[in-house]
Image (spheres, grey):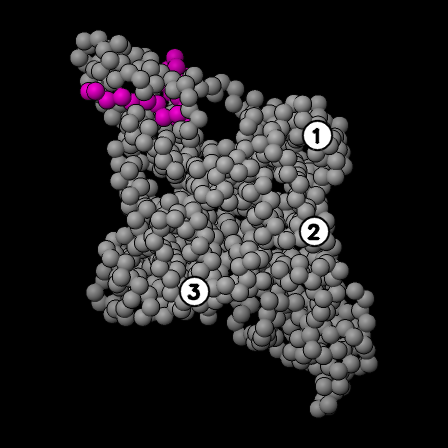
């Protein structure tokens, strides 16, 4: 978006508060980051702010301001002022959403999110690049149970539109309590199909491939992950620790980020962890860390032999885990993982405190030890 | 005692330093640890025998024979394990196993001993949940509560679903144009066909809330959730707060989106925790930022404030947790957002809490009679 004075109709960004201290001192407050910027300027420029609603071009503003003033603006000063405000992320073109090449229905559905991203990123061009990458990204999800189903629901709401779902299970009655899509009419149906259908109800243009099969050591990951831009593992069978290591080894070697979220009842309150190859610890690093941390913590064999139906969790906790995971994915697409650190946190239901600890990369890790990006 | 007990399948029994008698029980569902010292090794073997197939008497005889002092100690120990939700009774466990909502019941059983479990469940499912506003927050809260077993809802909203709601509300493309109350009722009844859902196609007014509360039967079993932000959350909170104080009905202020922070709202238990007015007074006292003093704020009509599905869902998940805790009406699982509110930070995944205590000068809820009540 080039700044063309003739058709640029500047609009003060909605996520900024503007205060006038006196005729010549303006304080801008960036609401999302709580940054402040104080600007001293010609009183007519301060007055011009009230005209920056996206309806007037710079020339029109100049004409309006000049009319009754005894102290006219020096030539080009309004244009310079507008350029400055734009550079500081305070102005956007009034029609910035219409300028995108994303499908109009998609933009209409995501308008409120695009405004959120504008608050965070401040530059409409960057916002549209991020959203375009989200729109085009291939997401592969292993496990679409409690956490996986809510994650898919939130990811399609965030504008992701290309999914590959892997899960061998069918929806059963007890899923009522946690799954995003488990009403009676779906019992007995493949979870993959049910989630695919739900994704299409939000975004009829979405492209969803389904693989109703388990992840096993014989699964050909090259085939499933060939175009993957991000991989999500919520599969609890076989044990999520094992599937995560298998996926992490493949993803780390191929530079694909991997989100591990939820997994089974007991982990519903967990904040998902994102493995960014070469930046964060990988699943092998985590495993080595836990082997050490949990040394000596070994429960007795449980007296009850069949414990399968004895675990529990709440829908709100599944939604919490899914939401924190979805936020991680969004943050990854915003800044490509540079701000991610290793560690885990978990919401304690008792008092809603977060118990967190950090994990460093293992320099001798067989999988990611040598990687530097 | 012909009681068949078992160690709950979700509880791990962990020797920490057995030579010093140190053991942990780890309740995996709620991630809580009960640490204790067990000096009598026979008690450890007793716990490891709690597979649900042998009666208390048989196990007691096996490990303690006729040792009267040992048996006395065992009885106290087992009572402790029951009260702390470490062991459960076989028939209750079987009933849970066969239940559609076994996952919720198993979770609640981390807090509620087996002998109270189904009483608590009945209270939860029968609680009358009044949701004011079915925007982003309301649609999420209703869906999460239906999945938690609630079967009695009153929904208040007057808007149809719009296409631009779909980025954050739990509606589908096919719902656009339909009334939100109709869509959410269908969602609830998809989960629970027998649930009872009353609809009001209306905006919030004090008269409407008074009317709804007078119909919910025993006020003891109602909870009101404020998910309405029109014309402002402050206004809707004041209206709902006043009506609910008068009727002594617990209420949850659902919070919402506040730039990159997701506001997690407080729970009000009338005359027990801080009320809406107590909190307003405390928030007003936080010195207004020096920035705002003497400054003229530029008027900005027609602003678009952004929002995001996961941030709404996080706030809604706290609301739903709170409503479950209010509805359980048990000292064992009290609401945890009373007299405080919180913010979830998008950038750091951290939660920050702000305490907003009950105030002696509150005209709504102070026991101090010299304060003139306005309610």
Callouts 1 and 3 on one subunit: no
Query: Is residue A67 covered in magenta?
Result: no
Q: Mark 2 points at which residue?
A: A135
Q: For the point 60% across and 48% down, which residue is it?
A: A199
Identified at 71% across, 61% down, the residue is A124
For the point 19% across and 18% down, the residue is B72
Within the image, what quadrant is residue B28 found in?
Answer: top left
Residue nearest the viewer, comparing B179 with B45: B179
**Labels 1 and 2 positioned on one and the same chain:** yes
Q: What chain letter is assigned to the residue under label 3? A: B
A322 horizontally vs B275: left or right? right
Answer left or right for B45 relative to B143. Answer: left
Depicted A365 relative to depicted B167: above or below: above
Q: Which chain carries label 2?
A: A
Q: How far apart are marks 1 and 2 (CA)?
A: 23 Å
- Whether discs 2 and 3 lie on one chain: the answer is no
Front-most of A222 and A55? Answer: A222
Residue B203, x across and y down, in percent: 41, 69
Q: Residues within 10 Å of mark 1 (few under 14, many from 20)?
A: some
How many residues crowd mark 2 within 10 Å: few (<14), some (14–19), many (20+)?
Answer: some
Q: Crowding near pointer 3: few (<14 within 10 Å), some, many (20+)?
A: many
x, y percentage for residue B267? 37, 53
> Please, what secondary structure does the residue beneath circle 3 have?
strand
Q: Name the residue under label 1.
A: A221
Q: Mark 3 points at which residue?
A: B157
Going 69% across and 78% down the picture, which residue do you hit?
A: A55
Tell me where the magenta segment starts and ends, as one range.
Answer: B1-23
């Amino acid at each position: 978006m080039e700044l063309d004075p003739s058709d640029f109709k500047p609009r003060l960004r909605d996520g900024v508060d503007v205060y006038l201290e006196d005729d010549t001192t303006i304080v801008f407050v960036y609401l999302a980051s709580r940054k402040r910027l104080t600007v001293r300027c010609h009183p007519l420029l301060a007055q011009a702010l009230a005209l920056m609603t996206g309806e007037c071009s710079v020339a029109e503003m100049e004409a309006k301001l000049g009319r009754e003033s005894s102290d006219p603006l020096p030539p080009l000063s309004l244009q310079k002022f507008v350029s400055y405000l734009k550079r500081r992320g305070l102005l956007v073109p009034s029609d910035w959403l219409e300028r995108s090449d994303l499908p109009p229905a998609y933009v209409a559905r995501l308008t409120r999110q695009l405004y959120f991203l504008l608050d965070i990123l401040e530059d409409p061009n960057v916002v549209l690049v991020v959203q375009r990458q989200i729109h085009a990204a291939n997401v592969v999800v292993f496990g679409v149970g409690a956490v996986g189903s809510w994650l898919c629901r939130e990811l399609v709401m965030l504008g992701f539109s290309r999914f590959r779902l892997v899960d061998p299970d069918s929806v059963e009655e007890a899923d009522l309590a946690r799954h995003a899509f488990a009403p009676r009419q779906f019992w007995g149906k493949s979870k993959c199909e049910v989630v695919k259908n739900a994704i299409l109800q939000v975004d009829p243009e979405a492209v969803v491939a389904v693989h109703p099969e388990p992840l096993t050591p014989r699964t050909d990951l090259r085939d499933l992950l060939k175009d993957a831009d991000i991989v999500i593992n919520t599969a609890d069978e076989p044990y999520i620790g094992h599937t995560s290591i298998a996926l992490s080894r493949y993803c780390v070697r191929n530079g694909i980020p991997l989100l591990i979220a939820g997994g089974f009842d007991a982990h519903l309150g967990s904040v998902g962890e994102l493995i960014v190859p070469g930046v964060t610890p990988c699943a092998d690093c985590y495993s080595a860390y836990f082997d050490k941390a949990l040394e000596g913590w070994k429960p007795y064999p449980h007296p009850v032999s069949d414990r399968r139906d004895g675990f529990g969790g709440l829908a709100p906790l599944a939604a919490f885990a899914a939401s924190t995971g979805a936020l991680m994915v969004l943050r990854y697409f915003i800044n490509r993982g540079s701000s991610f650190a290793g560690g885990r946190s978990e919401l304690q239901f008792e008092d809603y405190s977060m118990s967190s600890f950090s994990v460093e990369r293992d320099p001798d890790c067989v999988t990611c030890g040598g990687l530097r990006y | 005692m012909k009681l068949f007990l078992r160690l709950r399948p979700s509880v791990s029994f962990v020797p920490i330093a057995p030579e010093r008698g140190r053991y942990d029980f780890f309740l995996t569902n709620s991630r809580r640890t009960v640490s204790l010292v067990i000096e009598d090794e026979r008690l450890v073997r007793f716990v490891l025998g709690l597979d649900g197939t042998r009666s208390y008497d048989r196990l007691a005889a096996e490990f303690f024979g006729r040792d009267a002092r040992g048996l006395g100690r065992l009885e106290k120990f087992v009572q402790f394990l029951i009260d702390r939700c470490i062991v459960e009774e076989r028939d209750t466990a079987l009933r849970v196993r066969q239940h559609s909502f076994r996952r919720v019941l198993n979770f609640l059983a981390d807090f509620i001993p087996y002998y109270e479990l189904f009483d608590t469940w009945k209270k939860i499912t029968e609680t009358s949940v009044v949701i004011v506003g079915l925007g982003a927050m309301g649609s999420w809260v209703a869906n999460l509560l239906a999945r938690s077993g609630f079967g009695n809802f009153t929904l208040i909203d007057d808007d149809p679903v719009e296409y631009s709601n779909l980025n954050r509300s739990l509606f589908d493309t096919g719902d656009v144009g339909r009334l939100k109350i109709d869509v959410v009722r269908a969602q609830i009844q998809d989960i629970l066909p027998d649930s009872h859902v009353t609809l009001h196609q209306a905006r919030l007014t004090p008269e409407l809330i008074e009317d709804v509360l007078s119909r919910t039967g025993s006020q003891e079993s109602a909870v009101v959730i404020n998910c309405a932000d029109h014309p402002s959350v402050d206004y809707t909170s004041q209206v709902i707060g006043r009506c609910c104080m008068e009727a002594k009905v617990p209420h949850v202020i659902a919070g919402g989106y506040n730039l990159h922070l997701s506001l997690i709202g407080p729970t009000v238990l009338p005359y027990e925790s801080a009320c809406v007015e107590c909190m307003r007074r405390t928030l007003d006292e936080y010195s207004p930022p020096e920035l705002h003093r003497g400054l003229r704020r530029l008027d900005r009509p027609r602003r678009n404030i952004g929002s995001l599905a996961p941030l709404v869902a996080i706030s809604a998940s706290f609301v739903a947790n709170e409503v479950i805790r209010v509805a359980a009406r048990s000292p064992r699982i009290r609401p945890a957002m009373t007299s405080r509110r919180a913010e979830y930070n998008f950038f750091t995944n951290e939660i920050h809490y702000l305490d907003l205590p009950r105030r002696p000068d509150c005209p709504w809820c102070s026991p101090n009679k010299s304060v003139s009540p306005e309610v």
